[in-house]
Image (cartoon, grey):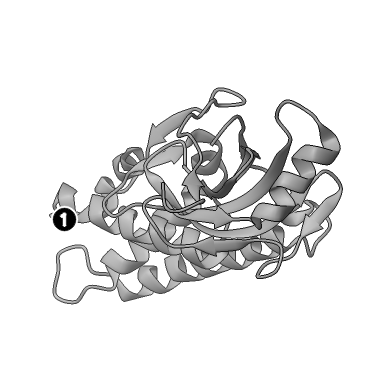
Amino acid sequence: MNGNVIWQTDLCVPAQELQVVNLGSLAENMVLYLPGCADVMIRKSLQEVFAEFCHKTGALRMDAAVNLRRGVTRYPLHAPFNCIVESVSEVRHGSRELRAGRGYGLHDGCPPYISLPGAWVDGVLDVERSPQPAVHCSCALKPRMNSEECPDWFLQKYGYAIRAGAMARLKEMGGRPWSDPAQAAREMITYANAMNEACVAAAGVDGSVSGPRGIDCFNYGGMI
């Protein structure tokens, strides 16, 4: 507790089962094309590209329901596997969207947290008189350092891109038995195109998805 500011209880309840797989499974499809390359080097490249892809595209998303409590202004945002919340694109209370900077703030921490005006929280509780009114946050995630945990849906959708990015990095290394600048260039084109498509999808530009409000993602609800 810090004055009248307290932290929300750390209790998380998944809204649905989340299937988490190991990103390292992609290495099995790369070894054949990388003669002499150590397994640890392949896996490190996959980890680095995975983190870069998520950071640049915001494609790894989480929808979190944050239950409000009287007097609580800080609400930690916990991710359901080995990653962190990097940004929040939207916070909504019912049909109302809260504005960043004025309606809410996102702050660094372990874990990061959103802050809400205490008077607003208490006012909502007084008006609604519901047992657990909540705000809903659309979050972009980034894997922690050295993490290979990845949602199955993400691997199925973007695994080819992560593999291409890792192959490009490894193939462009000079003086190695597996070096191949021409293939590195081809793999980099595949990776760059995939990142562009993921960015467009996250922004909801092509109409196939509705961006952060309806992007193909896993849901994570309950009290945070």
- Which one is in front, 132 or 159? 132
Q: Residue at x 51, y 67 (%)?
A: 56
* Residue 94 appears anywhere in the view: yes
Where does label 1 land, which residue?
A: 37
Say which element carries label 1. loop
Q: Residue at x 28, y 53 (%)?
A: 33
Instruction: Indicate left or right for 54 with 149 as reference.
Output: right
Q: Residues within 10 Å of mark 1 (few under 14, many from 20)?
A: some
- Which one is in front, 5 or 220? 5
- Would you identify the image quadrant in which residue 112 lies? bottom left
Q: Residue at x 59, y 63 (%)?
A: 105
Residue at far front of view: 3
* Residue 194 appears anywhere in the view: no
- x then y, percent, for residue 110: 36, 52
Q: Residue at x 42, y 64 (%)?
A: 52
Query: Is 160 drawn above or below residue 150 in the view shown?
Result: below
- x then y, percent, for residue 93: 78, 47
The total of numbered circles placed on residues is 1
